[in-house]
Image (cartoon, grey):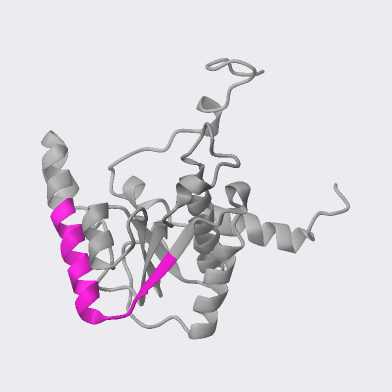
Amino acid sequence: MSEHAFSHEERAAVYRAIAERRDMRHFSGGEVPAEVLARLLEAAHHAPSVGLMQPWRFVRITDPQLRESVHELVEAERVRTAEALGERSDEFMRLKVEGIRDCAELLAVALMEGREAHVFGRRTLPEMDMASVACAIQNLWLAARAEGLGLGWVSLFDPEALAALLGMPAGSKPVALLCLGPVQAFYEKPMLVEEGWAKPRPLSELLFENRWGIQGD
């Protein structure tokens, strides 16, 4: 055991948050206290980022009319996604894919403008800015679970339409709508598993040694 390790109880709490994190779609209204929201956003802001560029930007959506306009964008994309799914379209339309109208807080997360100026760590992998934003969202997600709050990542929207709706500058790009707030209960399993939409694969099928597709002993 490393001398830098957390205590047993602290380690258990970290792994519990990871194991019990869920992509939530069902919310029970209520509110997120200001001090809790501040903690969650600070946790997100502590995420690692390539070249310390901190490409994340957060837009807290508090205007009810704007929230409804965001919901309309998501609903339009939900219908287009169903059409693209072909034979699974009806099955998809029965899924609850967002909680925009029901969640206590709605946050848009975006990539900042001017990202091309940041070369460190991105010369051959420019998409590392997106990876950095994903780390920030995961931090927020795990912190929310520890606080007993649900969070759902919604990606069903036209980025250009959402950017226009939020008055974002040219070159920036929204990548997530986060529904955050109290829930009646957390799903026992990921919702898409519970609904029979997909089955997760075990780690053993995804872990290779030295060469792609070669599994260790």
Residue 101: % across, % down: 24, 72
- Residue at far right of view: 3
Q: Residue at x 20, y 66 (%)?
A: 71
Is residue 71 rendered magenta in the image? yes
Looking at the picture, does residue 138 appear above or below residue 213? below
Q: Is residue 199 visible?
A: yes
Q: Is residue 197 above or below residue 95?
A: above
User: Residue 14: percent from the left, percent from the top?
Assistant: 64, 58
| Nearer-the-camera pick, 90 or 111 | 111
Main SS of the magenta part reads helix
Residue 184 seen from this side: no
Residue 34 lies in the magenta stretch: no
Q: Position of residue 57 (x, y in %)?
A: 45, 63
Q: Is 115 located above or below residue 106 in the figure?
A: above
Q: Position of residue 28 (x, y in %)?
A: 33, 76
Residue 97, picture quadrant = bottom left
Q: Is residue 83 left or right of residue 161?
A: left
Q: Nearer the viewer, residue 128 or 209?
A: 128
Is residue 63 left or right of 37 when viewed as pictured?
Answer: left
> 24 left or right of 130?
left
Q: How many marks?
A: 0
Quadrant position of the C terminus in the picture: top right
Image point (23%, 66%), residue name: 165
Q: Residue placed at 51% from the left, 65% from the top?
A: 145
Q: Nearer the viewer, residue 54 or 207?
A: 54
**Measuring 38% from the left and 70% from the top, which residue is drawn there?**
59
Q: Is residue 164 above or below residue 212?
A: below
Q: Which residues are magenta?
A: 58-77
